[in-house]
Structure formats: C-alpha cells, structure tokens
C-alpha cells in the first residue's frame, strides 16, 4: 500500500519508515500536517499515519481535511500515533474521522495488524464504490428505458408528458417558436391485417428512422400512439416545419414499401402541423390543433401535409433552420 507519514519528530518518523518498508509498503514521509496535506492533495494514499501534535497543522486538522475531501471511489484509512494515553484525545480523533490509533513506542506486530485491517477496509470501500457506480448506471438505464418506446426507440408518452410540463412552465415567459408535427401511417390497420404484425413493426421502425433523420439535436421525437408519431421542433417557423414534414413524407414514399390498400399501392404517411402562437391556451390545445390538422390531411386523401393555418409554403432547405443541418438517425 502507499502510506503517508506525518510526524515532526525525526527519530519517530524514521522508526515508522523502517517498519513500513520492512513490511513491504511504499512510504511518503512529511514533517508536519500542512506538508502532509499538500502531498495528499496531489497523490492517492491508501493510509495516513499521523502524529496528533505537530506544528503548522496538527493531526486532528489533517484528518478533518482528509475526510472532507470528496472522493467516493477512494477511501483513505487514517491512523493516529500518540505518546499520550488521554482518552479525550482518542475521542477527538474519532470525531475528526480517524479509523484507529497507536501509542508510542510502536510495535511492528501491532502496526502490521492495523495495516491488515486498513487494507481490508479499503478494499471493501472500493467494492462498495464499484457497486454504487453500477447501481447508478442501472438506474440511469432504467430511467431512460421507462421513457423510451422499445420498438421505435423514440420517446414515449411518459417522456412527452414530462417535456410538455416543462414547455408549459416556459410558456409563461418568452416561448417559441415551437412547432408540433403529428404523423400517422396511412391505412396501417389494413397493412397489419394483410402483411402481419411483424411487417407492421418494421414499417413503424422505418418511419421512426426517417423522422429522426430530419431532426436536429434540439428537436424531440415521440411515438404518440399505435401508428401515430409526434415531432416537436424548437426555433422553427410554420413554413419550415411544413417543409420538414414534407421531407419525411417524401422519404417514406421513396421507400416504396408495398401496400395493396395504401395510397399508390405503397406505405405513406399523413402529417398535421401546428405552431405555438401567442394566445394558445395550453400545450394540450396546441397538440389538439396539430391532431386536427392531421385529421384534415387524412380527410383530404392522405399522403399529404396540412398546416393548422393555411398559407403558402415557401421553398426552404433543412440548413435554413437557424443554420442547423438535420441530425441523422443512429441505432
């Protein structure tokens, strides 16, 4: 183990050094608490063996500083060495965070026994730290899984609800521009009935990939229902959002997935687009507007994009959306 000695008495320090080297440990020696603290901050130490009474900084203060330094992955075992049999000093050492103590003159066997305990305690802390890290990682994975649709890997309705709560809180101040894009796979029930649910799952996965390819980092994609999807685009005008929806619609059509009951005998999607405007009552009202626009697109024959406010959609490229290119899908 790497052991730090803090001892102002030269003879005592040399005796401890010799004992530790004889036991096969790596030793770093200092002459007072301040020097020991400076070394400790720069070098990982398994054990600190410190005298209680020292100039500049005593052993109690050194122990407090060692214990106050945050390091969840590393535990340093602290042993006080004193020539006094004062029980109050021992209690003070325990309050400061010491693990054990030895009384001068030191005995090699007693020191060796203390170091065996120190090594066991240090290994125990290391295992606990590793388990804690694994648990934290598992909790993060479970948190993400609870908010992710297992089929499409898009966010699910739980994540949507949380994000909408955040949007609603921000709506009290400067808000937007935000656009909601609601998508639906045309005649999806007929597709499942004809080709089977496994083929239907593959269609939903393809749609999700296309939607994410046309999202930026700041945008959010959700599986809203069985065959319904939602994109929420930040910093995007209604015209730009309609362009994104049109890009997605064209990309799905370009896949040319056969569908006997579909528009043009292939799988297509319809989309409704709504922009958050001043005067919109709630985020739920906003989403209902997008859903109404989607219903309008389907009633007009499907495989098209319908904005909640009828206006001419000017040509625009993805790079025009505040200079941020589309982010491609990654598995």
Image (spheres, rainbow, N blue to C red):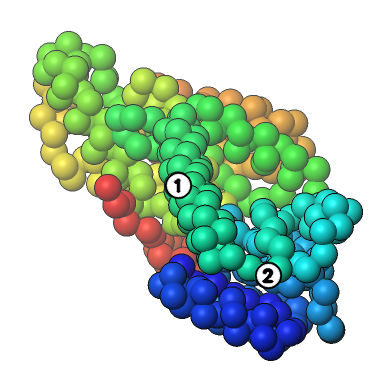
- Count of numbered marks: 2
Determine if residue 230 is in view. Answer: no
Q: Position of residue 312 (x, y in %)?
A: 49, 50
**Residue depicted at 28% across the width and 37% down the height:** 207
Which image quadrant for residue 160?
A: top right
Label annotation for residue 105: 2
> Is there CB contact under 8 Å for labels 2 and 1?
no
Indicate the secondary structure of the residue bearing disc 2.
loop
Where residue 118 sits: x, y (%)?
54, 56
**Residue lying at the far right of the rendered structure:** 88
In the depicted view, which residue is nearer to us: 313 or 70?
A: 70
- Which residue is depicted at the point 44% across and 70% down? 23
Of the pair 127 and 33, the residue shown nearer to us: 33
* Residue 172 in view, yes or no: yes
- Would you name the residue on which mark 1 appears? 127
Distance between the alpha carbons at the discs numbered 2 and 1: 34 Å
Q: Position of residue 313 (x, y in %)?
A: 47, 52
Sequence-wise, which precedes: disc 2 or disc 1? 2
Q: Residues within 10 Å of mark 2 (few under 14, many from 20)?
A: few
């Amino acid at each position: 183990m790497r052991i730090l000695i803090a001892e102002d008495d030269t003879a005592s320090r040399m005796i401890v050094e010799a004992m530790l080297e004889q036991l096969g440990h790596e030793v770093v020696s200092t002459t007072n608490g301040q020097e020991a603290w400076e070394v400790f901050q720069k070098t990982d130490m398994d054990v600190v063996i410190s005298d209680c009474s020292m100039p500049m900084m005593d052993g109690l203060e050194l122990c407090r500083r060692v214990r106050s330094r945050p390091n969840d992955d590393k535990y340093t075992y602290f042993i006080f060495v004193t020539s006094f049999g004062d029980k109050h000093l021992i209690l003070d050492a325990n309050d400061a965070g010491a693990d054990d103590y030895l009384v001068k003159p030191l005995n090699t066997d007693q020191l060796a026994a203390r170091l065996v305990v120190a090594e066991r305690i240090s290994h125990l802390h290391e295992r606990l730290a590793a388990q804690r890290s694994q648990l934290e990682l598992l909790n993060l994975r479970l948190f993400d899984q609870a908010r992710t649709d297992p089929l499409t890997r898009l966010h699910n309705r739980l994540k949507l609800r949380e994000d909408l709560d955040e949007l609603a809180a921000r709506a009290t101040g400067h808000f937007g521009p935000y656009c909601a894009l609601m998508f639906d796979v045309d005649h999806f029930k007929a597709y499942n009935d004809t080709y089977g649910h496994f083929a239907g799952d593959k269609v939903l996965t393809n749609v999700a990939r296309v939607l994410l390819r046309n999202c930026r980092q700041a945008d959010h994609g959700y599986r809203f229902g069985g065959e319904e999807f939602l994109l929420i685009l930040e910093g995007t005008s209604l015209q730009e959002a309609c362009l994104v929806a049109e890009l997605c619609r064209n990309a799905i059509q370009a896949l040319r997935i056969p569908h006997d009951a579909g528009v043009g005998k292939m799988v297509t999607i319809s989309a409704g687009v709504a922009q958050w405007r001043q005067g919109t009552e709630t985020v739920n009202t906003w989403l209902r507007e997008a859903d109404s626009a989607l219903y309008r697109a389907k009633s007009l024959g499907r495989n098209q994009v319908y904005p909640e406010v009828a206006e001419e959609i000017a040509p625009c490229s993805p790079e025009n959306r505040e200079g941020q290119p589309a982010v491609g899908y990654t598995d």
